[in-house]
Amino acid sequence: MIFDSTFIILIPAMILAIYAQGKVQSTFNKYLKYRNAHGYTGADVARRLLDMNGLYDVPIEVIGGTLTDHYDPSTKVMRLSRDVYSGTSVAAIGVAAHETGHAIQHKEGYIPLTVRNLIVPVANFGSNLAWPLFLIGLIMGIPSLLDFGIILFSAVVIFQIITLPVEFNASNRAIRLLSSENILTDAEIKPAREVLNAAALTYLAATLTAILQLIRLIVLREERD
């Protein structure tokens, strides 16, 4: 029961995660019906912003799913979901500009993005092995495995924390570009910002979840002594 009793620590993160997921879906779907005045597609906007920043060599591909949009710094490829790639909604434009913001970060050597990319392998390793090692240590009473599991999971927490400025900066860049380049009208900027702010909640939820999960591991470790 000692394991189950610590689950309460995660409740605030679970509540925020559920709220954030609902918020981003409802906000995106709401403004998916709001066509931008110029009739640009997400792909149009991404290409224009990439080119004006000298990123002619970054291709834009279509990827399946909803809100699966991302820029891959390892291959220098931008992938947009179909609703964003072909969509003319304010929501689509906001998301496409956000991903372009990541591409610009990569080109400029934005330090938080560089650090995040460097620790991705460690974070993935920690995410896959932290809990199995910790549970083995907990069951078999091996303190060194408990400590190693906590150390590995700490890499996941660091990754999530570094992700926050990366995402917020990409959204800020997106809004500035959409406004300064007159891609969206003043009336359209607000809903585009709402979409990106809603998406930011999911990153906050992920970070809070990771932090509370780490606290949970530490509590379990202390109770084991």
Image (cartoon, rainbow, N blue to C red):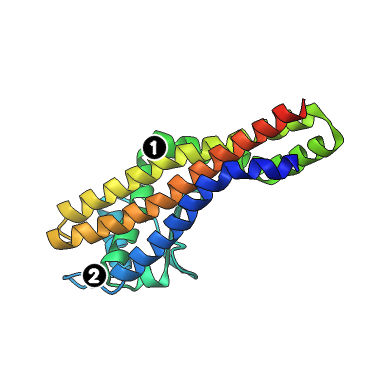
Asked if residue 2 lies left or right of residue 112, the reply is right
Residue furthest top as drawn: 225
- Examine the rendered structure and indicate whether residue 111 appears above or below residue 132: above
Residue 121 shown left or right of residue 12 in the figure: right
Q: Is residue 121 left or right of residue 207?
A: right
Q: Amino acid at mark 2?
A: Tyr
Residue 52 in picture, x, y percent from top left: 24, 53
- Report the side of 1 relative to 45 (left or right): right
Per the image, the residue denoted by label 2 is 40
Number of marks in picture: 2
- Viewport quadrant of the N terminus: top right
Which residue is depicted at the point 51% across and 46% down? 13
Q: Residue at x 27, y 47 (%)?
A: 173
Residue 24 is situated, as x and y percent measured from the top left of the image, at 39, 60
Amino acid of disc 1: Gly
Mark toward the start of the polypeptide (1 vs 2): 2
Q: Residue at x 13, y 58 (%)?
A: 186
Question: Nearer the viewer's eye, disc 1 or disc 2?
Answer: 2
Displayed quadrant of residue 126: top right
Disc 1 on helix, strand or loop? loop
Residue 125 on image: x %, y %: 66, 42
Q: Quadrant location of residue 44?
A: bottom left
Q: Which mark is residue 223?
A: none
Residue density around tag 1, few if under 14, some if 14–19, many if 20 or more, within 10 Å: few
Residue 209 location (% of width, % of height): 54, 44
Element under label 2? loop
Q: The C terminus lies in which quarter of the figure?
A: top right
Residue ID for mark 1? 109
Residue at image position (31%, 59%) is 195
Tell me: residue 43, above or below residue 50. Answer: below
